[in-house]
Amino acid sequence: MLAKNVILKGKTILVTGVAGFIGGNLAKRLLQEFVDVKVVGIDNMNDYYDVRLKEDRLKELLSYSSFTFIKGDISDKSTVSQLFAAHHPQVVVNLAAQAGVRYSITNPDAYIASNLIGFYNILEACRHSYDEGKTGVEHLVYASSSSVYGSNKKVPYSTDDKVDNPVSLYAATKKSNELMAHAYSKLYNIPSTGLRFFTVYGPAGRPDMAYFGFTDKLVKGEKIRIFNYGKCKRDFTYIDDIVEGVVRVMQHAPERMTGEDGLPLPPYKVYNIGNSHPENLLDFVDILQQELVRAGVLPADYDFEAHKELVPMQPGDVPVTYADTTPLEQDFGFRPATPLRDGLHDFIKWYVVNYIL
């Protein structure tokens, strides 16, 4: 197991996309757990999904005196430069991104702005944090995605696998992030770690994700569409497991070393964070409906078959996601393990309070 070389106590941590699902949960964990930590969060509060969810996350974070919020877009270079000049973050966690595979097909501009230009601005700010001999950023952690594996046939997906064949623009931007981070790590000795997240779910999550959208439709008596005729598998990973993985990774930056040529060896790593237990979509829907009945959201005699429609695979989709988390386990002594039923149970409890009662 790797020893901690980044002490979070007393540090200023920048979390981009702080009002998002992962960002909000991560910021809350940092504020609750680490002494004298200052969290600076930035988010553009866009309306890709119901902005009230983002506002609720933000409201909770603003109750902490050591939290500072900046409403802004990381695709605006001056905003990022001013943030770094004012707050001098020592650890940066870049979670700001335009998410969603299908949305990237119809709205490509949003992905170029946020995922490419935005991340470039973060890298440039990290680079210049070392100007004039300053200590600067100790560790840049950023969100990649399981989508970089494209339609690779070999499973489980390993970070040693080739990922040169993305099947969506979203996936291409995430692969690009990894390449850009590697270049900046090599050129400017920025310790960076990319995290390939696998199908994140949980309470107060994203409404565009299947578990949330299916619940909405079933409650309204509408049909749910199950792609690839239900023959897809997804490695559903609970939000608390994702946050635990991020927090552990934040505390060990890849070591700076010099190569034989006298130039830096890139202090760069990439890890999968997934449950390593892919679930068939039809089994997933079955567990979801059982939990909806158990919670009293739907009646026991609800005709689920009448509300299911099996449809072909959609452009940009892949048949399976499955994480090999061996390096994460070896380096950080952690692997996600929340069973899907437990995670969906927690989501439905939250859904009942916020949407039913």
Image (tube, grey):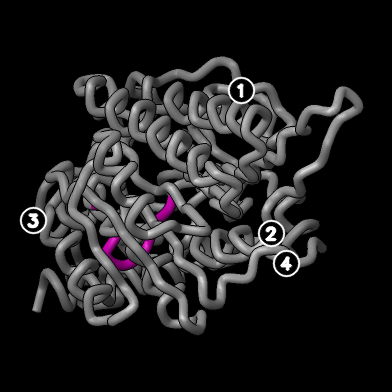
Please tell me which of labels 2 and 1 falls first in the chain.
1
Q: Position of residue 131 (x, y in %)?
A: 53, 42
User: Which residue position is annotated with label 1?
Assistant: 163
Q: Quadrant of residue 97?
A: top left
CA distance separating discs 1 and 3? 40 Å
| Any part of residue 144 in sight | no
What amino acid type should be assigned to the residue bearing mark 2? His
CA distance separating discs 1 and 4? 29 Å
Horizontally, residue 271 falls left or right of residue 313, namely right
Q: Quadrant of residue 8?
A: bottom right
- Camera-nearest label, 1 or 3: 1
* Viewer-proximal residue among 81 and 116: 81
| Any part of residue 24 in sight | yes
Q: Residues within 10 Å of mark 4 (few under 14, many from 20)?
A: some
The quarter in which the C terminus is drawn is bottom left
Which disc is residue 252 wearing? 2
Please tell me which of labels 3 and 2 falls first in the chain.
3
Q: Is the stretch drawn in magenta largely helix, strand or loop?
A: loop
What amino acid type should be assigned to the residue bearing mark 4? Lys
Asked if labels 2 and 4 touch by Cβ distance under 8 angstroms, the answer is yes
User: Which residue position is annotated with label 3?
Assistant: 220
Image point 65% across, 41% down: which residue?
270
Which residue range is magenta in the image? 200-206
Horizontally, residue 73 falls left or right of residue 140, namely left
The secondary structure type at the circle numbered 1 is loop
Q: Residues within 10 Å of mark 2 (few under 14, many from 20)?
A: many
Horizontally, residue 173 falls left or right of residue 288, namely right
The secondary structure type at the circle numbered 4 is loop
